[in-house]
């Protein structure tokens, strides 16, 4: 087990794996606050006098009503409102994240230090310890890589024909069509691929006009596709506010492609200037409407594709492996346990705005890269792993 230095918060006793994480925690949770001498709760210093007076004036009966008779009664009430949290060690229910955190620290000593140790304390059965690069490559070739040869060429023809059909069925003329998704990036897997299609039209005066007309246009496209000769091979998905989703059965049903069709005005054009791209990022940064931000971000789809296409083959294989493992080996994400997603082409998206454990993530990554699986792997820019951060 790796020995890690522990940084303890003097205010609440929480442990952190770095001084930086501790400082971030203090600024977010304790800065400008002082503990109440009567109830122990931390409140803002300017509100401390009013808070103390309210606690002092509260009667015993009122305190009983506010704090409930016992913990089980409190837990039942929170479970009924579907905001309860579960201990990650013993599955006991708690009303809030903070009560669960205190329980885990006091009963299980489950601190940030222990989480990091558990993350990098690989067992003998861990794949990084017992699998060679050759075995991993063989597994990918047999179970993950899409079929090559004639089947792949026929698939390209099928997808190309459907793209022409989409353009013809859209109720307004499309000046340009851009594509994305795993199929276009070259990271699709056996039997499954995603294709994102954005129809850009000059009919839309601006993004706001597009948002108002989009639902009607996508509904018309949906009905038009059903009436075509390929309609019996298109399985429509659930309705979404900004897109049309369906599965297209390709090559006599041997496999399917998952399509997501979107539309917008051509914000950047085919050859945007640097100033125009900076203007787009500024619009994204200032936009507080999530749907409007999604429409603005559609213009970045070609850059997402270029980023992955320019990657070395090893990176694409790693992406395929991660997609495969995510589908077959991970539990579904929840509001409490969201995955980390990084969009390299859209830095305005804060994918983990409440996380202060990046030092812990970097520590696990550093030790993972020292395992036998990654031996003799050359580190070259821009994928150079270094300690000089």
Image (spheres, grey):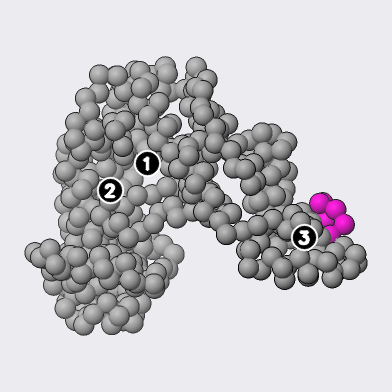
- As measured in the structure, the alpha-carbon distance from the residue carrying label 2 to the one carrying label 3 is 44 Å
Q: Position of 354 compared to 221: left or right?
A: right
At 23% from the left edge and 60% from the top edge, which residue is drawn? 300
- As measured in the structure, the alpha-carbon distance from the residue carrying label 1 to the one carrying label 3 is 39 Å
Q: Which mark is residue 323?
A: 1
At 37% from the left edge and 41% from the top edge, which residue is drawn? 323
Of marks 2 and 3, the one in the foreground? 3
At 19% from the left edge and 65% from the top edge, which residue is drawn? 278
Residue 176 at least partly seen: no
Q: Earlier in the sequence, mark 2 or mark 3?
A: 3
Give whichever of 100, 61 is nearer the camera: 61
Q: Position of 36 compared to 72: left or right?
A: left
At 89% from the left edge and 68% from the top edge, which residue is drawn? 59
Q: Looking at the picture, how far across and down is residue 333, in whole percent?
A: 51, 49
Give whichever of 70, 15 is nearer the camera: 15
Q: Which residue position holds label 2?
A: 182
Q: Looking at the picture, how far across and down is residue 110, in whole percent?
A: 63, 35
Whether 70 is among the magenta residues is yes
Residues in magenta? 68-73
Give whichever of 138, 339 is nearer the camera: 339
Snapshot quadrant of residue 47: bottom right
Q: Earlier in the sequence, mark 2 or mark 1?
A: 2
Q: Are marks 2 and 1 in contact (CB under 8 Å)?
A: yes
Q: Secondary structure at mark 3?
A: helix
Residue 311 at least partly seen: yes
Whether 71 is among the magenta residues is yes
Q: Looking at the picture, how far across and down is residue 192, in whole percent?
A: 33, 45
Q: Which residue position holds label 3?
A: 77
């Amino acid at each position: 087990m790796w020995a890690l230095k522990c940084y303890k918060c003097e205010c609440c006793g929480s442990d952190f794996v770095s001084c930086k994480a501790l400082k971030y925690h203090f600024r977010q949770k304790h800065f400008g606050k002082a503990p109440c001498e009567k109830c122990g709760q931390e409140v803002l210093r300017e509100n401390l006098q009013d808070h103390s007076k309210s606690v002092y004036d509260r009667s015993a009966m009122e305190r009983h009503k506010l704090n409930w008779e016992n913990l089980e009664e409190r837990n039942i009430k929170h479970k009924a409102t579907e905001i309860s949290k579960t201990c990650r060690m013993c599955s006991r229910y708690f009303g809030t994240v903070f009560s669960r955190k205190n329980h885990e620290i006091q009963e299980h000593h489950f601190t940030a230090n222990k989480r990091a140790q558990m993350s990098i304390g690989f067992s003998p059965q861990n794949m990084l310890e017992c699998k060679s690069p050759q075995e991993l490559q063989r597994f990918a070739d047999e179970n993950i890589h899409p079929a090559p040869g004639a089947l792949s060429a026929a698939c390209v023809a099928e997808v190309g024909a459907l793209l022409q059909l989409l353009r013809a069925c859209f109720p307004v003329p499309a000046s340009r069509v851009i594509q994305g998704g795993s199929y276009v990036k070259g990271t699709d897997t056996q039997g499954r691929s995603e294709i994102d299609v954005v129809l850009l039209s000059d009919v839309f005066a601006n993004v706001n006009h597009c948002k108002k007309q989009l639902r009607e246009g996508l509904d018309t496209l949906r009905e038009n596709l059903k009436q075509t000769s390929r309609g019996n091979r298109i399985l429509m998905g659930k309705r979404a506010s900004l897109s049309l989703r369906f599965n297209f059965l390709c090559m006599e049903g041997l496999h399917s492609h998952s399509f997501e069709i979107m539309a917008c005005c051509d914000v950047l054009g085919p050859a945007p200037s640097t100033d125009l791209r900076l203007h787009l990022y500024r619009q994204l940064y200032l936009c507080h409407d999530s749907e409007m931000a999604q429409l603005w971000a559609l213009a970045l789809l070609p850059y997402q594709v270029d980023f992955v296409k320019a990657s070395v083959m090893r990176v694409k294989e790693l992406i395929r492996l991660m997609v495969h493992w995510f589908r077959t080996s991970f539990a579904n994400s929840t509001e409490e346990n969201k995955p980390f997603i990084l969009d390299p082409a859209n830095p305005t998206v804060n994918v983990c705005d409440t996380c202060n454990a990046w030092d812990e993530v970097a520590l696990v990554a550093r030790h993972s890269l020292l395992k036998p699986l990654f031996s003799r792997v050359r580190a070259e820019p821009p994928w150079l792993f270094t300690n000089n951060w």
